[in-house]
């Protein structure tokens, strides 16, 4: 089911970039690898939404992602 909500009302662009950085690692050859598996992304967004709520933030920001 799709919710009719604009993504930018939940998470800002800098937070998305911070999340992408958080979910990118390096292998033994220093090659970038993604750890952005659907369940991992879902868990990180859920944690970020909960933290944003606890902080009284209107949406997820880069600071919220960095505080996870």
Image: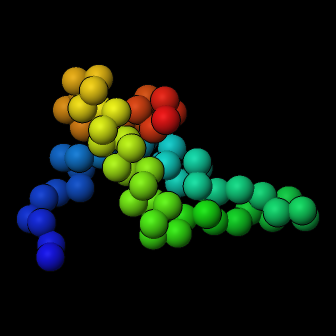
Which image quadrant is residue 4 in? bottom left
> Where's the N terminus, which quadrant?
bottom left
x, y percentage for residue 42?
Answer: 39, 60
Determine the residue located farthest toward the top in the rendered image. 55
Determine the residue located farthest toward the right in the rendered image. 29
x, y percentage for residue 14?
Answer: 42, 41
Camera-side residue of 10 and 44: 44
Q: Is residue 29 left or right of residue 52?
A: right
Visible residue check, residue 13:
no
x, y percentage for residue 2?
Answer: 15, 73
Instruction: Name which residue lies at 16% across and 57% down.
Output: 6
Instruction: Name which residue lies at 41% across and 32% down.
Output: 64
Which image quadrant is residue 55 in? top left
Visible residue check, residue 31:
yes
Instruction: Name which residue lies at 58% across and 55% down.
Output: 23
x, y percentage for residue 33?
Answer: 70, 66
Q: Is residue 10 left or right of residue 13?
A: left
Relative to 68, residue 11 above or below: below
Determine the residue located farthest toward the left in the rendered image. 4
């Amino acid at each position: 089911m799709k919710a009719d909500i604009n993504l930018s009302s939940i998470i800002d662009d800098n937070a998305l970039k911070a999340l992408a950085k958080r979910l990118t690692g390096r292998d033994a050859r220093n090659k970038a690898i993604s750890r952005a598996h659907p369940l991992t992304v879902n868990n990180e967004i859920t944690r970020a939404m909960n933290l944003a709520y606890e902080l009284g933030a209107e949406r997820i920001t880069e600071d919220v992602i960095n505080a996870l």
